Image (cartoon, rainbow, N blue to C red):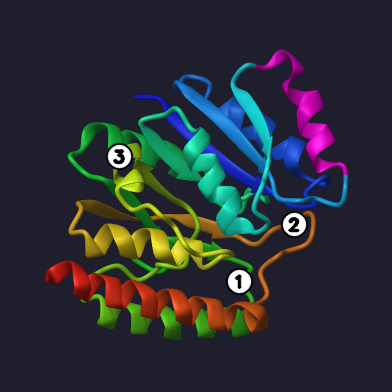
């Protein structure tokens, strides 16, 4: 099973090459491709990746055509060739060993997705800002109730999907980080099969975080309402 790893970047010149090299080193026994999508960077992130891939046919890079993280993810999905698709952030906040677990599970089990949770037994989390953590848990608890789900980390970006499951969830309408809420909710609403496993997460050490709670509150609420109504429409 071929694995497509989508990495969206915007102004990530401080760490993107390190991230790509670490991923390549740790999964070199897997059939994979790395899809980097440049989301209108104002630094030289794109040029760095272009230079890196000159002698590497496992990495491809594209310029986003619709500004925003949602557009970057959608472009990456459409350009992917793997039967399994995973999204990872450029800051390497997620553990490569968890990526390997994802890949083995989705390859061996009859599931459409594997959802990692940072908030169940066996998970580890380092450096999560307190205010963000409180808001995260409140929102995820509300979402869990609305969708009658056992899952509790919807907003986590790091998940893996079968290609067919993602294409059956199209179109993805979210424009920003809220796309990471929309994707698992559509899997759940369509009654697809998924596993939940504990994962490790650590706050970035290089570069600047793009996540802004104040700017994204309304977008997350929109996505929650949109997916809730879609869920009920699918019942009819």
Nearest the camera: 64 or 96?
64
Q: Judging from the image, what secondary structure is the residue with disc 3 in?
A: helix
Residue receiving disc 3: 164
The answer to if 55 sits in the magenta stretch is yes
Picture quadrant where residue 64 is located: top right
Asked if the residue under mark 1 is in contact with the one under mark 2, i.e. CB atoms within 8 Å, the reply is no
How many numbered tags mark residues here?
Answer: 3
The image position of residue 197, as x and y in percent, is 33, 54
Q: Judging from the image, what secondary structure is the residue with disc 1 in?
A: loop
The image position of residue 51, as x and y in percent, is 81, 25
**What residue sits 58% from the left and 53% below the top?**
71
Nearest the camera: 29 or 212?
212
In the image: residue 230, left or right of residue 118: left
Asked if the residue under mark 2 is in contact with the one under mark 3, i.e. CB atoms within 8 Å, the reply is no
The magenta stretch is: 44-56
Residue receiving disc 1: 128
Q: Which label sits in the foreground, 3 or 2?
A: 3
How crowded is the residue under tag 3: few (<14 C-alpha within 10 Å), some, or many (20+)?
few
Q: How far apart are marks 2 and 1 (CA)?
A: 12 Å
Q: Which label sits in the foreground, 3 or 1?
A: 3
How crowded is the residue under tag 2: few (<14 C-alpha within 10 Å), some, or many (20+)?
few
Residue receiving disc 2: 205
Q: Earlier in the sequence, mark 2 or mark 1?
A: 1
The answer to if 6 sits in the magenta stretch is no
Residue 149 visible here: no
Q: How far apart are marks 3 and 1 (CA)?
A: 33 Å
């Amino acid at each position: 099973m071929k694995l497509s790893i989508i990495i969206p970047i915007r102004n990530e010149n401080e760490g993107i090459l390190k991230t790509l090299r670490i991923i390549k080193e740790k999964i070199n026994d897997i059939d994979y491709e790395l899809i980097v999508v440049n989301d209108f960077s104002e630094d030289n992130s794109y040029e760095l990746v272009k230079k890196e891939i000159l002698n590497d046919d496992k990495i491809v890079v594209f310029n986003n055509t619709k500004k925003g993280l949602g557009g970057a993810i959608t472009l990456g999905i459409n350009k992917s060739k793997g039967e399994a698709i995973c999204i990872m952030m450029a800051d390497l906040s997620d553990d490569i060993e968890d990526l390997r677990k994802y890949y083995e599970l989705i390859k061996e089990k009859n599931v459409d997705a594997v959802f990692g949770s940072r908030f169940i037994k066996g998970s580890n989390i380092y450096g999560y800002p307190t205010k963000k953590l409180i808001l995260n848990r409140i929102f995820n608890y509300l979402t869990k109730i609305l969708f009658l789900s056992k899952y509790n980390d919807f907003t986590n970006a790091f998940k893996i999907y079968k290609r067919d499951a993602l294409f059956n969830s199209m179109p993805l309408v979210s424009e920003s980080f809220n796309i990471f809420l929309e994707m698992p909710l559509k899997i759940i609403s369509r009654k697809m099969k998924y596993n939940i496993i504990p994962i490790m997460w650590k706050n970035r050490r290089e570069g600047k975080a793009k996540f802004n709670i104040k700017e994204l509150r309304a977008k997350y609420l929109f996505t929650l309402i949109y997916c809730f109504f879609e869920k009920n429409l699918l019942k009819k």
